[in-house]
Amino acid sequence: MTWPVDSYRWEGPRTRSGLSQDVVKQHRTIGPYLNSLIRTGFVLQHVEEWGPTDQQVLERPELAVERERPVFLLVAAQKST
């Protein structure tokens, strides 16, 4: 199974078929998340689009599909004083 990222620049609600019903998700590009932190006085310390390492895929081959798109956006930020 893959998770194509189509119309990436279009932000807003997207409906996807779930197990038993449609699910409405809110899509945003990375910029608005980071810019809202900056605008509200946070200092970004680290940003990572997490995915499995080569070793993790070797140990669990089913994780290979998770390399098709970022699984998580991890952001470390601290409120400036």
Image (cartoon, rainbow, N blue to C red):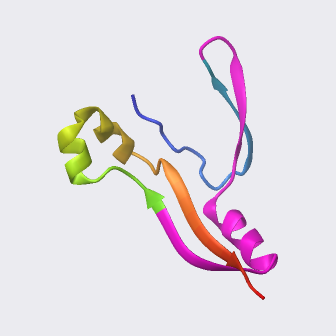
Q: Residue furthest top?
A: 20
Quadrant of res 14: top right
Q: Residue at x 47, y 59 (%)?
A: 49
> Magenta span has 35?
yes
Residue 2 located left or right of residue 47: left
Instruction: Answer left or right for 30 relative to 42.
Output: left
Q: In the figure, 34 relative to 3: above or below? A: below
Q: Is residue 40 magenta?
A: yes
Look at 46% across and 51% down and name the residue there.
70
Which residue sits at x=72%, y=65%?
32
- Residue 42 location in percent, x, y? 72, 78
Q: Nearer the viewer, residue 11 or 46?
A: 46
How many numbered discs? Answer: 0
Q: Residue furthest front?
A: 81
The extreme left residue here reads 58
| 20 relative to 7, above or below | above
Q: Residue furthest bottom?
A: 81
From the top left corner, tell me how far across and down residue 12 is, in percent: 76, 46
Q: Which residues are magenta?
A: 19-48
Residue 55 in the image: x percent, y percent? Answer: 20, 50
Classify residue 64 as left or right of residue 30. left
Question: Whole-percent x and y of residue 10?
Answer: 69, 51
Q: Quadrant of the N terminus?
A: top left
Tell me what residue is drawn at x 24 percent, y 36 percent. 60
Compared to residue 48, the image places residue 2 above or below, namely above
**Quadrant location of the C terminus in the rendered image:** bottom right
In this rendering, the answer to whether 54 lies above or below 60 is: below
Residue placed most toward the observer, 58 or 29: 58
